[in-house]
Amino acid sequence: MTNIKNNDLLLDTISSTENFPINFNELEQAAKQKLAAGPFGYIRSSAGGEETYRKNTESFAKYSIVPRFLTDVSVLNTEVTIFGRTYPHPLFIAPVGVNKIAHVDGEIAVAKAAAKYEFPYIQSTVSSYAIEEIAAVTEGSSKWYQLYWSQNKEISFSMVKRAEEAGYEAIVLTVDTVMLGWREEDIRNQFSPLKRGFAKGNYASDPVFMASLPDYDEDTIINSIIENIYHPSLNWDNIAELKERTSLPILIKGILHPDDAKLAFEKGIDGIIVSNHGGRQLDGVIASIDALPTIVDAVAGRIPVLFDSGIRRGSDAVKALALGATAVCIGRPFLWGLASGGQAGVERVLENFLQETKVSISLSGVRNLNELHKLKIVKS
Ligand SMILES: Cc1cc2nc3c(=O)[nH]c(=O)nc-3n(C[C@H](O)[C@H](O)[C@H](O)COP(=O)(O)O)c2cc1C
Ligand SMILES: O=C(O)C(=O)c1ccccc1
């Protein structure tokens, strides 16, 4: 719990701040100075004409907070309990692969920063570092594993087993990326992190994957990752198979339709993440924040509903939580922090994000997440 009276968060931050970019645009500009065009474009850009990417952030501005005052906000409790574990705040790290394109320390730096600020870390299948390497540097802190289904499904089950053994606490199956979206910036830059070997961490360390190869040449490994990650046949039967192979809670990431949310619940899924993958998959789809309210209605509190795509600052998190999200995940902001300053850069981004979120909750006149879920939001 934060005692706001004795801890003015803005003044705290000012007295501890060296010169580091604060908001998203500044962070993006700082990262642009550090990165080559290929990696920068890969992270920044999204699919098609980037209509959904723009909508993700512009749509937040349509929702306005209607605060209450005189409610004594001197003590703030941002705790949230998901699958029996209580987290100090409802802020997660979205699964993002190929982090070495941003910084040599890649996911190691991000996971350590996340552990320090108690943001649960969702590790991507296509990470530059392996499940066990992340677990080794983040002992005791909460981690979930994001699964990209493999053509050879035994590889998926092997990765899930490794995640279980390494102490990961949930599986997040991403369903919107059965193939990569149409990303023009990457064609322009002729840049594919997969082809350049940045996604190898979990594959080159996987016994089932490695045993499936005719030889261990770099090209063989990379081509087999590319073959496996293309999985257009993914369907609800695979969900049933996955459920049989793990006792961990399973979330589906990429839900945008309330009927898919209902189906997920009916099929025994434990949680969903409302997301359009930051606009990187199908351009023209609904902004994630516009999809959230109907999905929250459809789920009716039966399973947690996490949210990502377009979260840029604390007040965005407040809006998503007020619209019914159980927790929110941040994506690109931490990547820009990573590119700008490695682990220290991610720490600064998370610290500012956390502080702004806390201040925003308090200034809305609410004191805990139950009250926050009832905070009035109007849409213009
Ligand atoms: C460079 C990059 C790589 C990503 N890799 C993955 C991934 O491996 N698995 C996944 O489920 N989502 C991945 N995502 C999507 C994020 O989890 C998240 O949905 C998205 O970043 C949210 O949009 P925002 O960053 O604009 O807020 C990736 C996003 C970016 C920017
Ligand atoms: O770029 C992405 O959004 C993503 O999810 C991904 C998929 C495969 C390899 C690397 C990243």
Image (cartoon, rainbow, N blue to C red):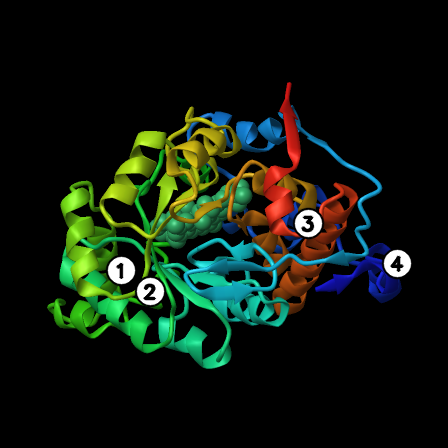
Q: Which mark is residue 27?
A: 3
Gap between marks 1 and 4 measured at Cα? 49 Å
Q: Are marks 2 and 3 in contact (CB under 8 Å)?
A: no
Mark before the other along the chain sequence, 2 or 3: 3
Mark before the other along the chain sequence, 1 or 3: 3
Q: Which mark is residue 51?
A: none
- Residue 234 visible: no
At 14% across and 46% down in the image, what residue appears?
Answer: 237
Q: Are marks 2 and 1 in contact (CB under 8 Å)?
A: yes
Which amino acid type is marked by label 4?
Answer: Leu
**Taking 253 as reference, is 268 left or right?**
left
Q: Which mark is residue 200?
A: 2
Q: Total label count?
A: 4
Badge 3 marks a residue whose secondary structure is helix
Up-down: is 68 above or below 352?
above
Badge 4 marks a residue whose secondary structure is helix
Residue tagged by mark 1? 222
At 32% across and 67% down in the image, what residue appears?
Answer: 202
Q: Which mark is residue 11?
A: 4
Q: Quadrant for residue 13, please give it.
A: bottom right
